[in-house]
Amino acid sequence: MSRKDTALLVTVEEGIGQSETEDLAHGILFSIDTTNPDKVIFFGPEESKKTVESVEKQYLDEFGEEFDYYEFVYLEDVDDFKVYFEAFNEKIIELSDYKVVIDYTLGTKTMAMAAAFNSMFLQKKIYLVGTERQDGAVIRGTEKIITQNLYPIYDGIMIRLLKGLFNTNQFNAGKAFIGSVTKANKDAYLKLFTAYYYFDNVDYKNANEYFDKKAFVKEWPEVKKQLGFNAKALHFLCEGEEDIRPYYVLASLISNAKRRAEETKYDDAIARLYRSLELIAQIRLKNEYGINTSDVDLTILEQHGINRNFEADFKGVVRISLIQGYELLNDFEDEIGKLYIENKHSFLANIFTRNNSILAHGLNSQSEKEYNNIRDLVLKFSKVLNPNINRVIRETEFPEFEIIMDF
């Protein structure tokens, strides 16, 4: 009998009587003849050895040679899923150089489930031998192979996990996981995870380069609207005019902080909100009064009759802090400056909280409550800076996939 580099894994049980044992063995023999393996591994309890012995006898009668290329994995508890699952898993991994085929026709339901799960997760071919029966007895010669295709189920599970990784901002993990999916559009997924990895890390240039709106919308039409928002946001973040781009940077920071908070990384989130507060003053001072907080032109202050004793650094450059920026806005009688004075106690309390963060100058970890307080403050000032900021924030939020089984 000519054989090929194939390992056949068979669940097996004991027949009730001699006739049934021979029928079971005949089914196994049909499976062996069909797959032509050069290795057969039986899984079952000690009692099922009788069935294998019947296979040996019928094999000799049928092919005129000894059936000497099999092994038996003895597993007594036929209803212990874990035992059978691990046994199949271990053997399949051991047979990595073989084409592995699994026949789960015989054996208990538990044994069949263990075989099926392994075939799905390890992507091995699985089938059963079907027969016609008369009065409950097998009609020999009517055997046929019925292939079970579990790959769509496997892919459905893997894609569900992949979308879950995206929804939880685990973009690097998602990229590493893409290879586990067999039939999905891997190129689209790789671009998606790469683009949003950079987007999440405020590397807008690289995010824009990998952002393939046409491919993304084709693959995931259910999130078409948000993908369109993100494409627009990345355009303004990379190429927007100086009077527009800063608002998108601010919105992106706020959305970024929200994602960190959803991961319970409140210190990270608060660090981004602190930068947002700083940016609000910087945008207002630049757009309305031509003041760059990293290089203040004191003549502008003199022209407005503002007398502030700002000291230059060793390079002769005047730089002002976050608090100084808001106080300066109040000197200009700006609406944001007035809002700062009205909320000064809350403002300074939140700044103190941030400064005590382990990611700033302190040793304390921050909580959701502290994040919410600073977030509310940032949103209050952002809305005064730009009444349409909620729309811009919406455009910088990431899409969220619905997690459903899609076979």
Image (tube, helix red, strand yellow):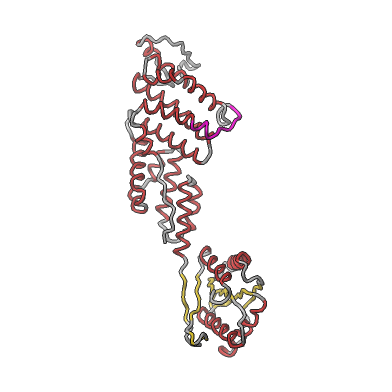
**Residues rendered magenta in the picture:** 362-372
**Towards the viewer: 375 or 313:** 375
* Residue at 46% in and 48% down: 166
Measured from the top left, where is residue 120 in percent x and y?
51, 65
Left or right of residue 114: residue 157: left
Question: Is residue 13 highlighted in magenta?
Answer: no
Measured from the top left, where is residue 245 in percent x and y?
35, 32
Measured from the top left, where is residue 256 in percent x and y?
45, 37
Quarter of the rendering containing residue 73: bottom right
User: What is the residue that sits farthest to the front in this orientation?
Assistant: 135
Q: Quadrant of the N terminus?
A: bottom right
Q: From what the image shows, is residue 165 above or below residue 295?
A: below
Left or right of residue 55: residue 187: left
**Towards the viewer: 110 or 102:** 110
Q: From what the image shows, is residue 289 above or below residue 153?
A: above
Measured from the top left, where is residue 42 in percent x and y?
61, 75
* Residue at 50% in and 34% down: 269
* Residue at 42% in and 45% down: 195
Question: Is residue 371 highlighted in magenta?
Answer: yes
Q: Quadrant of the C terminus?
A: bottom left
Quarter of the rendering containing residue 356: top right
Q: From what the image shows, is residue 62 above or below residue 215?
A: below
Image label count: 0
